[in-house]
Image: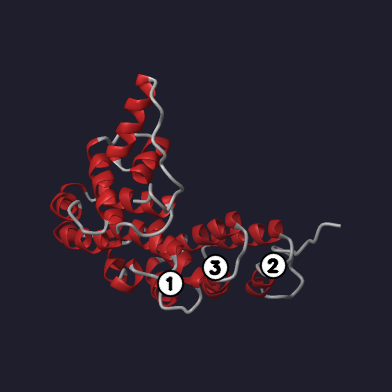
Amino acid sequence: MQEVVPINATNGTPQHTRVADALRAENPSVRLQAALAAGSSADPGFLEPLVERCATEPDFFVRDMLSWALTRLPPEVALPRIRRELDSEHVQARSQALHTLSKIGDRSAWPWITRDSLHDADDEVARTAWRVAVALVPEDEKKDLAAELVTQLGRGDRGVRLSLSRALVDLGHATEAVLTGAAEHPDPAVAAHARATAWLRHHPEAGRDEAMRIVVLGPEQAAAVDAAASGGAGIPDAGEPGETARC
């Protein structure tokens, strides 16, 4: 039997308590309904249970609804509470707080995207921080942000590397000098990632699959593979991701 937690019942229980209870229900559909109800009412009284649930919610769609509900609250109410989550010891709390900041889009939150966030040990938190930083950074601080992000070149798996490349590409001309320097880095993984990111800057029309291939192989090896394939020659061994083809 499907679990049902009343959201709008008038049984004498305060609505805040009913919604908070529903956000902890076993059934994700009930939790989704509760987050929707909280967002639809835009009542600041729901701030605390929404933020708390963000740190533990296992369902992607419910988490996204929780963030949406937080965007419906007045920024002056929601932002200070979300900021506290950026220093949480819980990975998901940090990641979801950053994601919510990206949805709110308030540039006053830019100073909260710290070096610690950009270098977070958890890849998902760092990826989210890169995206939020690019969205909120003032024009006159883009070069400093690019210099910070370029230190992460070569990090993580192919998805992480593509996220970093996309963030650097979205910073535009501010990345040109730092990518040129990083292309000469003694670590071949960093150098290849820098060259792949520079290639993506000049090929903004590249689809995700092509961009992923360039980031994984590097532009030179990708071109060699294409040339070999079109000429009928054997395709060079690209190795496993993270090994010889790592960038």
**Residue 102, picture quadrant:** bottom left
Residue drawn where x is 33% and y is 57% of the image: 154
Of the image marks 1 and 2, the number of the one nearer the N terminus = 2
> In the image, is 151 to the left or to the right of 64?
left
Q: Residue furthest right?
A: 1
Q: Name the residue under label 1.
A: 82
Of the image marks 2 and 3, the number of the one nearer the N terminus = 2
Q: How far apart are marks 2 and 3 (CA)?
A: 14 Å
Dot 3 lies on which element?
helix
Dot 1 lies on which element?
helix
Q: Mark 2 points at which residue?
A: 22
Q: Mark 3 points at which residue?
A: 54
Q: How far apart are marks 1 and 2 (CA)?
A: 21 Å
Residue drawn where x is 80% and y is 61% of the image: 3
Mark 3–mark 1 CB contact (< 8 Å) = no
Q: What residue type is labelled 3?
A: Cys
Q: Where is residue 153 in the image (x, y as percent from the top left)?
A: 30, 57
Mark in the foreground, 1 or 2: 1
Q: Which amino acid does label 2 sit on?
A: Ala
Q: Which of 156 and 143 is in front in this view?
A: 156
Dot 2 lies on which element?
helix
